[in-house]
Amino acid sequence: MKKFSLFLISVALLLGTVKLLQKRKNNLQLFTQQEQEILNQIAVGYNENEIAGLRHRSERSIQQCESNVLRKTNLPDISSAIQYALEKGLIRITYA
């Protein structure tokens, strides 16, 4: 009976580890590369117009990217999304 109990505990621990790894993997895939880069640019202080110029995109394209981030995170504003991304390790502030 003890061996069976140890087996069940081992299986439970293994399943918990697998779920944790899947959650981490899902977090890393939450944002596209472009979304990560734009979040980083916002975090270091660029505005939408400046980001659009740097990326050779329209300002509307940058706004759409921000909307996608907010939809994916279910957060009310881009500042909250940046804080979330930093806390989860999805972006790192880098200065270009």
Image (tube, helix red, strand yellow):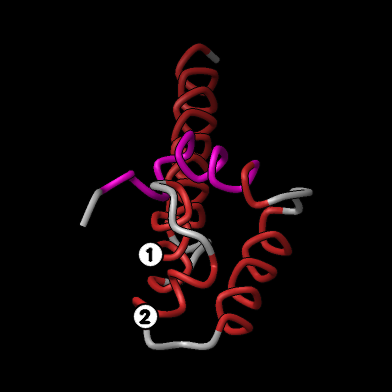
Outermost residue, top side = 2
Q: CA distance from mark 2 to mark 1?
A: 10 Å
Residue 44: x and y, percent?
39, 47
- Please give the range of residues in magenta: 80-94
- Location of mark 2 (residue): 55
Q: How would you rate the neighbour count of disc 1 (Cα within 10 Å): few for under 14, some for 14-19, many for 20 or more?
A: some
84 in magenta: yes
Q: The C terminus appears in which quarter of the rendering?
A: bottom left
Residue 32: x and y, percent?
45, 71
Kind of residue indicated by mark 1: Glu
Residue 40: x and y, percent?
40, 54
Above or below 80: residue 61: below
Outermost residue, left side = 96
Q: Nearer the viewer, residue 70 or 19?
A: 70
The residue shown at (51%, 57%) is: 26
- Location of mark 1 (residue): 37
* Cβ atoms under marks 2 and 1 closer than 8 Å: yes
Residue 73: x and y, percent?
67, 54
Q: Nearer the viewer, residue 2 or 47?
A: 47
Q: Secondary structure at mark 1?
A: helix
Q: Nearer the viewer, residue 46 or 83?
A: 46
Above or below 4: residue 85: below
Is 72 on the left-hand or right-hand side of 25? right
90 in magenta: yes
Q: How would you rate the neighbour count of disc 2 (Cα within 10 Å): few for under 14, some for 14-19, many for 20 or more?
A: few
The residue shown at (53%, 87%) is: 58
Q: Nearer the viewer, residue 12 or 69?
A: 69
Kind of residue indicated by mark 2: Arg
Q: Secondary structure at mark 2?
A: helix
The residue shown at (65%, 41%) is: 80
State which tag comes first along the sequence, 2 or 1: 1
